[in-house]
Image: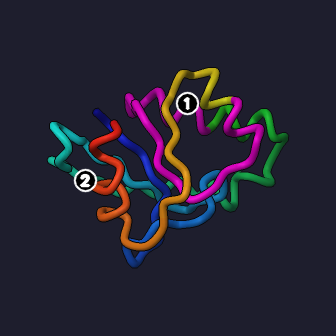
Amino acid sequence: MIVCAPVSKDGMIDPRWGRADWVALADVVDGEIVSWQEIEVSWSRLHDEGTSGSHHARVVTFLRDHHVEAVVANHMGEGMLRMLDAMRLPVHLGAAGDARAALEAVSNEL
């Protein structure tokens, strides 16, 4: 299962999902992370370069292009939650601290 989480440059969960600059894509198999890739998305800068709808579309495109099947984050707005629900993507909120540890903590729920 491909799981996406917002990350900071020091490997921590970024509390900003929709304005994250980097996200991690983790392939989780049988509760274990078997691969980890960090990608610069620059959503903090891009967020204000158009409407909320265009930003949400940008996020949808990224998630679809990378075959994301679940999202782990600290917090996100209601509009983003509705959008991910419409995509039928499970969302696990409340993540904090080390990003890999946060994903491992919810890996049994994935």
Say what amino acid the circle numbered 2 marks. Trp
- Quadrant housing residue 42: bottom right
Farthest front residue?
109
- Marks 1/2: CA–CA distance: 20 Å
Quarter that holds the C terminus: top left
Q: Residue at x 55, y 51 (%)?
A: 93
Q: Residue at x 79, y 33 (%)?
A: 53
Tell whether position 71 is magenta: yes
Q: Which residue is mark 2?
A: 36
Marks 2 and 1: in contact by CB < 8 Å? no
33 relative to 92 in the view: left or right? left
How crowded pointer 1 is (Cα within 10 Å; few <14, some 14-19, many 20+) is rated as: few
Farthest right residue?
51
In the displayed structure, 81 sits above or below 96; it is above
Tell whether position 89 is magenta: no
How crowded pointer 2 is (Cα within 10 Å; few <14, some 14-19, many 20+) is rated as: some
Q: Which residues are magenta?
A: 59-82
Q: Which residue is mark 1?
A: 61
Q: Residue at x 25, y 53 (%)?
A: 36
Q: Position of residue 9 (x, y in %)?
A: 43, 74
Q: Position of residue 2 (x, y in %)?
A: 32, 36
Assign a secondary structure to mark 2.
strand
Q: Position of residue 78 (x, y in %)?
A: 76, 41
As drawn, the label of residue 48 is none
Q: Position of residue 108 (x, y in %)?
A: 27, 43
In the displayed structure, 66 sits above or below 96; it is above
35 relative to 108 in the view: left or right? left
